[in-house]
Amino acid sequence: MRQILLFLSLFLLLNLPVNAQPILSENAKISIFTCSPGEELYSLFGHTAIRVIDDSLNLDLVFNYGIFSYSTSNFAYKFAKGETYYRMGIQRFRNFIDEYISDKRPVYEHILNLNRQEKQEMFNFLHINNLPENRVYLYSFFLDNCATRPRDVVEKILGDKLSWHQPDNSYIKPMEKHWKYKEISQLHNNWDGATFRTIIDIYMPKNSWNKYGICFALGMPTDTTADKYHAMFAPDFFMNALENAVIKRETGYEPLIKTKPIYYKPIKLYENIDPQPYILPPFQTFLILFVIVLMVSIYEIKRKKHFIAIDVFLYFITGIMGCIILFMSFFSMHDFVQQNYDILWANPFNLLFALLLPFKKIRHYTLTYQYVIFFISLITALLWPFLPETLVNANLLIVGTILVRSIVGINVLRRNETA
């Protein structure tokens, strides 16, 4: 019975008109939750939410800008195209925090140093955002997400009174219990040259398939310099910005954060490792394939043979990857996926080439393309360290594999012409 009454109270509260929202008491608190990264790909970079608590009203709600559904029709296609819509939702505090604790993900809570009027304005603004016509937004990983939305709310309420840095430009480091204390502190100490890629690298397990897939999809804009403001797309960097922010009052500057953060610690912490450690990592996988292909290719040249299936497989896969890059570059609404230099080796034309190779009658017409592949692969390999985009080093092994197979193809076709 008690649960039913609580549900009805929450339902009625959330459906009140904006101008009929409860008046918060002087003791009400508004805070920012920063949730540590999790195991799933969508939770790899953490999460941010806003909490409003007022004991006198028996009110304890979490405003969450990170709600989406896998059950949406054609979700994978829409995600690739950049048409993923997130929405705002309201949860009870206990339901929200229990979910993260059960997932072994620590949560940090920073109480905002707001006066009563600012609290009421933010509370009303959050409810306006939760109206059906406002709650849904087009998700953008770097520019509009669960962390940038709360940042924008804080800016909206405080306006020119808010500054994201200390008056003397000093820097407050993250608390030492923070899971990425060392990496974030080092990055802030050497911020010049920090890029969006530098920031996301902190979160991704090294040499993992998750990192490989994300980095393959991202283009040259990811290597542009990210100032500290735009770095707040990452929840941990937004949290650190909160710790450094100040409010200009009539009596002087006051910290945006009222007290030391509250730390919700699960019994056992989630370890940020590759969730599938038994699968061979990308670099080792491509290294083994390169060595095998190299040995087979040497055998082919010595024995004057040609295992066409190897070429069909290699060019088919790289052609498909090239088509993905082409689609992301020209049709996706995602930011930072354009100008992807992986297209130098993942060429969409390789797909057509792979489909033509099995036909002997037209195979001799492909000699010119083999030369083109050879020279592009050679130039790509030589210029790899100097390209304006930081590419995954494992892909250099694919470039080497293509280079080897193009040499074999040229050798076979020239031998057939002179036969």
Image: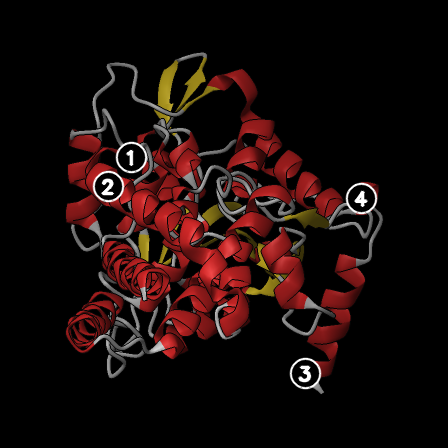
Determine the CA span between mark 3 and mark 1. 63 Å
Residue 224 coordinates in the image, percent (x, y) = 37, 30
Residue 68 visible, this orientation: yes
- The label number, if any, that marks residue 369 in the structure image: none
Mark 4 or mark 2, earlier in chain: 4
Residue that label 3 marks: 2
Residue 100 coordinates in the image, percent (x, y) = 42, 70
Residue 132 coordinates in the image, percent (x, y) = 81, 52
Q: Secondary structure at mark 3?
A: helix
Q: Are marks 3 and 1 in contact (CB under 8 Å)?
A: no
Residue 171 coordinates in the image, percent (x, y) = 21, 27
Which residue type does callout 3 highlight?
Arg
Q: Secondary structure at mark 2?
A: helix
Residue that label 4 marks: 18
Q: Residue at x 26, y 58 (%)?
A: 407
Q: Quadrant of residue 18?
A: top right
| Closer-to-camera residue (328/365) | 365
Mark 3 or mark 2, earlier in chain: 3
Mark 4 or mark 3, earlier in chain: 3
- The label number, if any, that marks residue 387 in the structure image: 1
Q: Secondary structure at mark 1?
A: loop
State which mark lies toward you, 3 or 2: 2
Residue 259 visible, this orientation: no
Residue that label 2 marks: 384
Q: Is residue 32 above or below residue 193?
A: below
> Dividing the image into 4 quarters, which one contains the C terminus?
bottom left
Determine the CA span between mark 4 and mark 2. 56 Å
Residue sitting at the far bottom: 1
Determine the CA span between mark 1 and mark 2. 6 Å
Q: Are marks 1 and 2 in contact (CB under 8 Å)?
A: yes
